[in-house]
Image: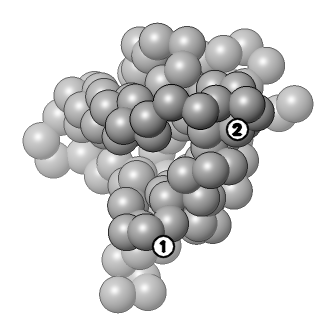
Amino acid sequence: RPPVTVGGLTVDIAGRRATLHGREVVLRAKEFDLLARLAEQPGVAVSRETLMAEVWDAHWYGSTKTLDVHIAAVRRKLASVAGPDAEVPRIATLRGHGYRLEDPARSAAEG
C-alpha cells in the first residue's frame, strides 16, 4: 500500500513507519495500528467498536479504556515530534462514538 499523508503526517502502513514534517514518530505497535487505521480515512468518524475490533481483537470483551490511553499516547507523541509551532493532524474525540483524524489545513479552511 502507498503511504497515506494527512497534513504533515505520513503513515507508511507497509513499512510500519510514521513521520511528521519529515521527523520519525516512534510509536508502539498498537499506537501505530490506531494511527494507521484513522489515517486510512482522514476526516471520517471511526467508532470505538470498530477501532477495538480492528486494532485489538474482534472478540475483545474488556474495557475500552485502553483505547483512550493509546489515543492519548499518540496525541502526546505527535505533539512532541511536531514542536510548539508546527501544525499537527488532530485526533478529535467524538463523544459517544469514537475518533476522527483531522487535517489541520482542512480544518482551518472549513472553520
Q: Identity of the amino acid at label 2?
A: Ala
Q: Position of residue 102 (x, y in %)?
A: 47, 62
- For marks 2 and 1, give the CA distance: 29 Å
Q: Identity of the amino acid at label 1?
A: Arg
Q: Residue furthest toward the front?
A: 61
Q: If the image is split into quadrants, where does the C terminus sit?
A: bottom left
Left or right: 4, with 96 as reference point: right
Q: Is residue 51 above or below residue 48?
A: above
Of tags 2 and 1, the one toward the viewer is: 2
Q: Secondary structure at mark 2?
A: helix
Q: Which mark is residue 53?
A: 2
Q: Residue furthest toward the right?
A: 1
Disc nearer the start of the sequence (2/1): 2
Dot 2 crowding, Cα within 10 Å, few <14, some 14–19, many 20+: some
Q: If the image is split into quadrants, where does the N terminus sit?
A: top right
Q: Please tell me which residue is depicted at 36% across the width and 37% down the height of the picture.
A: 65
Q: Quadrant of residue 57?
A: top right
Tell which of 40 and 9 is nearer to you.
40
Q: Please tell me which residue is depicted at 76% across the width and 33% down the height of the picture.
A: 58
Left or right: 46, with 99 as reference point: right
Q: Which mark is residue 63?
A: none
Residue 21 makes an appearance in the image: no
| Residue where numbered disc 1 is placed | 106
Q: Position of residue 53 (x, y in %)?
A: 70, 38
Residue 106 makes an appearance in the image: yes
